[in-house]
Image (cartoon, helix red, strand yellow):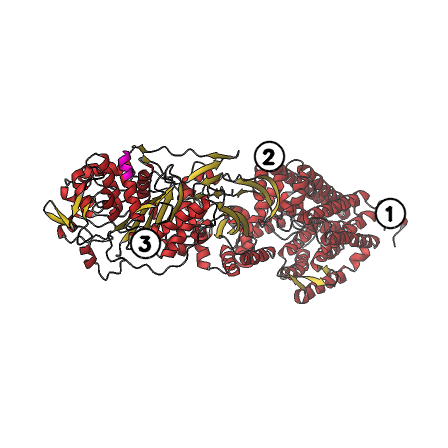
């Protein structure tokens, strides 16, 4: 099933960039947690398991995987429902399946599963461009896991499913007019959502974002500290493990949500440019894979996987600079988190898979 | 073809996404450039303020020594428990938990925090001063649990005074600087002397606080020290006080069973050997910040323990004033020591009859006998000859009027009236009849114990009015340097005949048939004079009966020893002691201690004696029955009203 010649078509540059980001992530977690902690070790295990998942996703033809996508999708839904009722509770949310030695977060895998099922649905469609009915079905397929994840509650991860649907639909030929209309509806719905859909703590986060000083002790604290952390880094940074903001815990969850702030503090603007460059390279290289894809299915699959990744990268880095409301969204490849690492690397397995098999039948 | 059109659409839309991503990343890079390059210095400063603190290290105050080098006041380390609000999210919870853990009243802690609410949040608010070890242990445990991360325990040097409030009024006490004291090197919250030597020599004693720059983490815990400037301890100061004499005097009062005051000094140079004011407060109560209850009780106590009676209490000098009248008459050349007056138990002046204390009268007495027996008629006669202004002049020469100039704060002026003084204060002219009361120390004469001590010293040393002082030497860092003693205030060399008559008369008070026999020490030639200060006139006594006020008279004993070349002089004031002679045993004990110490013998100890039996007639108790006298004789102020 893994033909030898395919080996030559693996995008080694992309893989190297991905691994470089993982390495930067591990070193910054080492710094932020104060040395060789269990957290660092877990992260390394996560990278290793992720590479296994990557190889696994690489070896099977993405087309045969797409054929089974409805099973994968249903399986993930089942896991999400299980989590909703029987999952391990941490910090007020039910997101994990306790597997003894580690916890599995199914919502992380929902992104790739959704990309797969949407790519399959739109890519195998006989018609050239998507119809309104197609879009409605796309909406439903996306809404079901989104709703379940939002109930955990994990609004951040739930939100990452939306770019998946939009990216795939967009490339699949969703009319630009419709996109504009949806954007308009979203804009109009915002006040209503504010009124009815958001929890108090969520409202607070947003209003704090607009004016952090109004709550410098509470929710605004993290945002102010994030800006101080990044700004105090300067052009060359304070040096590895020399950051004061991260080391002295002025910045909360430094090894997780704010890992990029730690990087900015210790490695400075230079380090930021290197990391940003690597992420941009990875994204552009993956888009290239979509362009080169042999079929629509492949292109859509790459887009779907890439959409949630890109969305998370951009949002998290913006938040790390204190320029976006604080949300529990991690930075893929760098933030601490086993499930996220495995799922992300598995996703890159799919992207490499599509590019690698661009010449096969 | 649908296939190629499809391809084209995908390519176009992928390009749109590509451009979008590149633009977004460019925007991110620019944002970071703004934060990290353009605004770097601003954020760097904020980060530094975040994790660096400058703490004040309180300097220990200078140690006080007695004249023999014995440590009187030193420093110990105490623990202050403070709240640093900087990272506190729920102040009420912190206050509640802290109060609970430390076992103190929540409302009290709340009150302290409220008082300092306006200060910067990084400045610790001290809520428990001089915490017990149990409190410190309990707090520290909770701190480690992150339950009370915003509570800090600081070790601070605190004043340690001798036990039993010894010499409390000499030392005074320390306290947080008030608004008027801030400035000139004194910062808000600094501990400064508020009374006594602590206040007068605060500049010397205070030292210089140090600073410590530390790194703290987000919960305010100190991680490491960046820089430390050690505090400079205050100057070491040696006092003229002799610990053993101070103790002897205070024990003497305890033994005698009354409050009062004493000032004992070297009559030739004014060095104060002992200064007592009882009841006293415990300066240790103030050392780590006095609690409100103790402060309130000290302030409302009817016995006024905060008042330094030695320099702030003014009382009628009674018969001790006869020394002034005798000196004035002899030095003015009006009489010589052999001048005799016949005492028949009273005499008429200006149409009124003034009584002597001895009903039958003393008969014909000369100066020496008049002093020995404290004959009123003799001094009425001298006073009448002198007139009030010459009495005033000699009271001033002897140091009894005005201020003594002692180096303690808030001294009160002693008042010996003159015609001018009366005109200024009442707008009335002086009536010669008033002089008669003044000449036995009644009337408008009110003096502090300190001024009486100066007066007897001047008499002892033959006319040199010394300024009593408490500081002896200062160590400015390069070893002990003697302090410059205050200049002699006045020097009038007495005629040898004056001196001989006074010294003989005063010697006979103690060693002859006088009232001071309880002060007699064989071979020491103690000289002295007793006196009684009326608290209230005989008329007033009737009116005030049942008011609960202590109306018993005060007793005086002024003394020096030995008669020739005196080395020690002083005053014992017994508050409501009723009889001056009851102060004599205190003086005796101090003098014995002085000589025992000087000669290297074991110090005497007081043995309980049976309650003293008053003699049949108390020569110092004024039993003037003429109502007219009472009318022009306002009562001596009740101690504590000034």
Q: Where, by quadrant of the figure, is residue A142 drawn?
A: bottom right
Image point (53%, 33%), residue name: B478
Residue B173 appearing in the image: no
Separation (CA) of disc 3 from disc 2: 86 Å
Asked if the stretch drawn in magenta spans residue B499, the answer is: yes
Give the labeled residue for mark 3: B582
Seen from the viewer's position, the closer of residues B555 and B109 is B555
* Image-quadrant location for residue A226: top right
Residue at 37% in and 59% down: B609
Q: Is residue B188 found inside the magenta-colored segment of the image?
A: no
Residue at the spot of label 2:
B38
Taking the image as shown, residue A49 lies to the left or right of residue A258, namely right
Q: At x 62% / y 56%, what residue is drawn?
A: A155
On residue A7, the disc is 1
- Residue range highlighted in magenta: B494-500
Q: Picture coordinates of residue B392 (x, y %)?
A: 23, 38
Q: CA distance from mark 1 to mark 2?
A: 47 Å
Residue A109, position in %: x, y?
Answer: 72, 57
Secondary structure under tag 1 reads helix
Disc 1 packing (10 Å; few <14; some 14–19; many ≥20): few
């Amino acid at each position: 099933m893994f033909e030898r010649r395919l080996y030559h078509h693996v995008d080694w540059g992309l893989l190297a960039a991905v691994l470089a980001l993982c390495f930067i992530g591990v070193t910054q977690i080492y710094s932020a947690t104060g040395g060789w902690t269990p957290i660092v070790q877990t992260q390394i295990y996560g990278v290793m398991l992720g590479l296994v998942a990557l190889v696994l996703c690489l070896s099977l033809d993405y087309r045969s995987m797409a054929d089974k996508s409805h099973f994968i999708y249903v399986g993930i839904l089942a896991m999400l429902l299980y989590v909703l009722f029987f999952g391990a509770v941490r910090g007020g949310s039910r997101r994990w399946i306790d597997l003894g030695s580690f916890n599995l977060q199914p919502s992380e895998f929902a992104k790739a599963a959704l990309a797969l099922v949407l790519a399959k649905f739109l890519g195998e469609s006989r018609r050239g461009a998507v119809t309104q009915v197609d879009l409605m079905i796309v909406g439903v397929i996306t809404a079901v896991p989104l709703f379940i994840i939002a109930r955990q509650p994990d609004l951040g991860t739930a939100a990452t499913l939306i770019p998946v649907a939009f990216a795939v639909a967009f490339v699949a030929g969703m009319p630009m007019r419709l996109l504009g209309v949806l954007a308009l509806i979203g804009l109009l719905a915002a006040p209503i959502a504010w009124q009815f859909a958001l929890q108090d703590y969520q409202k607070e986060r947003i209003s704090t974002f607009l004016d952090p000083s109004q709550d410098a002790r509470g929710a605004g604290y993290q945002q102010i500290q994030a800006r101080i952390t990044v700004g105090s880094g300067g052009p060359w940074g304070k040096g590895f493990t020399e950051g004061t903001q991260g080391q002295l815990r002025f910045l909360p969850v430094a090894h997780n949500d704010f890992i990029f702030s730690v990087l900015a503090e210790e490695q400075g603007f230079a380090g930021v440019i290197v990391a940003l460059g690597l992420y941009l390279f990875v994204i552009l290289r993956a888009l290239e894979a979509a362009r080169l894809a042999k079929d629509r299915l492949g292109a859509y699959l790459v887009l779907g996987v890439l959409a949630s990744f890109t969305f998370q990268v951009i949002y998290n880095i913006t938040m790390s600079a204190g320029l976006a409301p604080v949300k529990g969204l991690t930075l893929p490849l760098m933030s601490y988190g086993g499930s996220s690492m495995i799922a992300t690397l598995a996703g890159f397995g799919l992207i490499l898979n599509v590019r690698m098999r661009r010449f096969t039948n | 073809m649908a296939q190629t059109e499809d391809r084209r659409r995908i390519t176009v839309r992928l390009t749109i996404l590509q451009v979008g991503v590149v633009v977004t990343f460019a925007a991110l890079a620019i944002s970071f450039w703004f934060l990290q390059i353009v605004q770097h210095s601003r954020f760097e400063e904020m980060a530094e303020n975040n994790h660096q603190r400058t703490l004040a290290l309180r300097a220990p105050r200078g140690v006080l020594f007695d004249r023999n080098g014995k440590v009187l006041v030193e420093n110990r380390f105490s623990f202050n428990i403070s709240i640093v609000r900087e990272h506190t999210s729920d102040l009420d919870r912190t206050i509640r938990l802290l109060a609970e853990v430390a076992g103190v009243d929540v409302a009290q802690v709340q009150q302290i925090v409220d008082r300092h609410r306006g200060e910067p949040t990084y400045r610790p608010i001290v809520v428990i001063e001089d915490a017990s070890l149990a409190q410190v242990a309990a707090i520290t445990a909770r701190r480690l649990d992150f339950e009370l991360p915003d509570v800090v325990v600081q070790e601070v040097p605190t004043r340690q005074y001798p036990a039993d409030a010894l010499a409390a009024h000499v030392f005074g006490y320390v306290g947080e600087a008030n608004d008027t004291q801030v400035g000139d090197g004194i910062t808000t919250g600094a501990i400064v002397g508020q009374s006594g030597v602590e206040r007068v020599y605060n500049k010397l004693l205070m030292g210089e606080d140090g600073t410590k720059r530390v790194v703290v983490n987000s919960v305010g815990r100190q991680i490491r020290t960046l820089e430390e400037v050690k505090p400079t301890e205050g100057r070491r100061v040696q006092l003229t006080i002799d610990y053993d004499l101070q103790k002897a005097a205070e024990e003497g009062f305890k033994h005698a069973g009354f409050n009062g005051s004493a000032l004992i000094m070297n009559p030739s140079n004014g060095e104060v050997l002992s200064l007592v004011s009882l009841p006293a407060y415990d300066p240790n109560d103030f050392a780590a910040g006095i609690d409100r209850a103790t402060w309130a009780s000290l302030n409302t106590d009817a016995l006024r323990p905060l008042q330094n009676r030695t320099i702030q209490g003014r009382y009628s000098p009674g018969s001790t004033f006869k020394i002034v009248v005798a000196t004035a008459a002899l030095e003015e050349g009006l009489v010589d020591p052999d001048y005799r007056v016949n005492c028949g138990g009273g005499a008429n002046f200006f149409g009124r009859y003034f009584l002597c204390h001895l009903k039958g009268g003393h008969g014909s007495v000369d100066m020496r006998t008049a002093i020995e027996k404290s004959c009123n008629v003799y001094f009425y006669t001298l006073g009448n000859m002198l007139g009030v202004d010459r009495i005033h002049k000699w009271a001033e020469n002897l140091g009894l009027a005005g201020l003594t100039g002692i180096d303690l704060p808030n001294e009160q002026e002693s008042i010996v009236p003159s015609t001018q003084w009366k005109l200024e204060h009442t707008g009335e002219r002086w009536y010669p009849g008033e002089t008669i009361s003044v000449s036995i120390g009644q009337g408008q004469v009110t003096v502090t114990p300190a001024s009486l001590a100066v007066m007897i010293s001047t008499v002892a040393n033959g006319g040199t009015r010394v300024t009593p002082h408490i500081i002896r030497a200062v160590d400015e860092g390069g070893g002990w340097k003697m302090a410059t003693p205050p200049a002699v205030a006045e020097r009038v060399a007495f005629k040898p005949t004056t001196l001989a008559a006074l010294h003989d008369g005063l010697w006979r008070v103690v060693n002859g048939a006088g009232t001071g026999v309880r002060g007699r020490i064989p071979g020491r030639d103690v000289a002295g004079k007793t006196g009684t200060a009326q608290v209230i006139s005989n008329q007033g006594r009737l009116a005030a009966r049942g008011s609960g006020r202590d109306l018993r008279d005060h007793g005086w004993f002024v003394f020096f020893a030995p008669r020739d070349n005196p080395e020690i002089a002083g005053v014992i004031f017994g508050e409501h002691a009723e009889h001056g002679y009851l102060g004599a045993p205190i003086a005796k004990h101090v003098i014995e201690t002085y000589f025992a110490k000087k000669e290297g013998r074991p110090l005497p100890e007081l043995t309980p004696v049976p309650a003293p039996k008053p003699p049949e007639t108390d020569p110092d108790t004024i039993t003037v029955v003429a109502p007219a006298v009472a009318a022009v004789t306002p009562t001596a102020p009740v101690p504590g009203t000034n």
